[in-house]
Image (cartoon, rainbow, N blue to C red):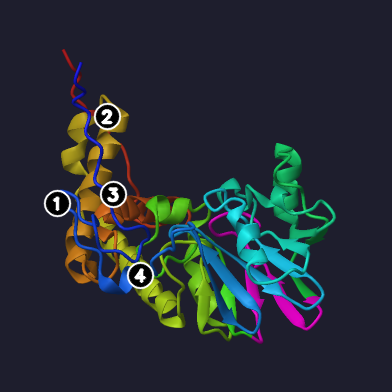
Amino acid sequence: MTSTTQTPAMSPQGTGSTAGQQGAGWLPVPDSSLGPVIPERGYLVEEIRDGLYWVTEGMYQCAFMVTGHGVIAIDAPPSIGDRVTKAIRSVTDEPVTHVVYSHSHGDHIGTTDQFSDDALRIGHADTKKWLDRLRDPRRKPPDIVFDDSYTLEVGSQTLRLDYRGGNHALGNIFIHAPRQRALMIVDVFYPGWVPFAGLGLCRDIPGFVDHHDYALEYDFDTLISGHLTRLGRREDVETQREYVTDLRREALRALADVDQVPSWQYVHNVYGMFTNHFNRIASQVAEELLPKWKGRLAGVDFFIHNHSFIMLEALRVDWNAEPFVVLPPPSLIVEED
């Protein structure tokens, strides 16, 4: 029997390639959003400055620091896996003595078990609480725990770890390398791209908004963001802050402008009523912002509607914005036959 299954044509490896970046109806990915081409070995390792390196397979990012007295590893995403160790070994024979957790999520620290149990794990108190609860053998709870700030000094290197409150996840921290003028915070910023769905699957939207200003308080010119295609710069934080500010402003305007009355016809299915109203609000926001942001940040065509809904819900639930979304008065409800 002859198979009719067709294998897709192979495209050049790595997010630096423009091959296959456009699907049916997708906006093109701006050149400024593209990252370096990933070598055939499946990962890229590059020195940022003075012993600080980043590692990527084109979608996830982690880092490590060579100190002269051992290596500090920062995260180890499963998408890169044991290639993190290979990247380290391509640079130095020093053992990994410390492992810093950006936060608790498995997609960023899920293969930190590749490092010796003797290596000291360092993370925020909320990260330890979560990992203690999950009991995942691949994510050993941190040995060194802090609430607000912790300074890690090993050999000639220094890292400053700070927690400024909730954002993408509880316990998600800033990792600042002052000598290298590099800042790492994961799942908050997406250089060249809009955030992933749910504004980066964010747990605390007001905290997420505030973290743009917090980040800009640091002295840095290189950003390691955990995603997506390339390293970031200070201006990437400023650009995303502008996008989020636009989103909040237009969602607040649409909340006031979009009439609730047309949605009341669906009151007998309350989910239908709310969905209709929220979709009309999100559509107005998307229609207003898409012309400005297409061609500037990749992925805006995929997630602008979702981001509008998430911001709307944060305005209602967290910021208690008015007008409130309400059911129609009983006198206007017509019973269905």
Residue 104: give x, y in percent of width and height. Answer: 65, 51
Residue that label 3 marks = 10
Query: Closer to us: mark 2 or mark 4?
Result: 4
Coordinates of residue 30 in the picture (x, y in percent): 25, 69
Label drawn at residue 330: 2
Q: Earlier in the sequence, mark 1 or mark 2?
A: 1
Quadrant assignment for the C terminus: top left
The magenta segment: 153-179
- The reply to whether discs 1 and 3 touch (Cβ–Cβ < 8 Å) is no
Q: Is residue 328 visible?
A: no
Instruction: Give the residue displayed 22% in from the left and 58% down from the top.
Output: 286
Asked if the residue at tag 4 contacts the one at tag 2, i.e. Cβ–Cβ closer than 8 Å, the answer is no
**Disc 1 versus disc 2: distance between alpha carbons?**
44 Å
User: Residues under labels 1 and 3: Cα distance?
Assistant: 21 Å
Mark 1 belongs to which amino acid?
A: Gly
Frontmost of labels 3 and 2 is 3
Rendered location of residue 278, percent (x, y): 27, 45
Residue at the spot of label 4: 192
Which residue is the site of mark 1?
A: 25
Q: Is residue 177 magenta?
A: yes
Q: Residues within 10 Å of mark 2 (few under 14, many from 20)?
A: few
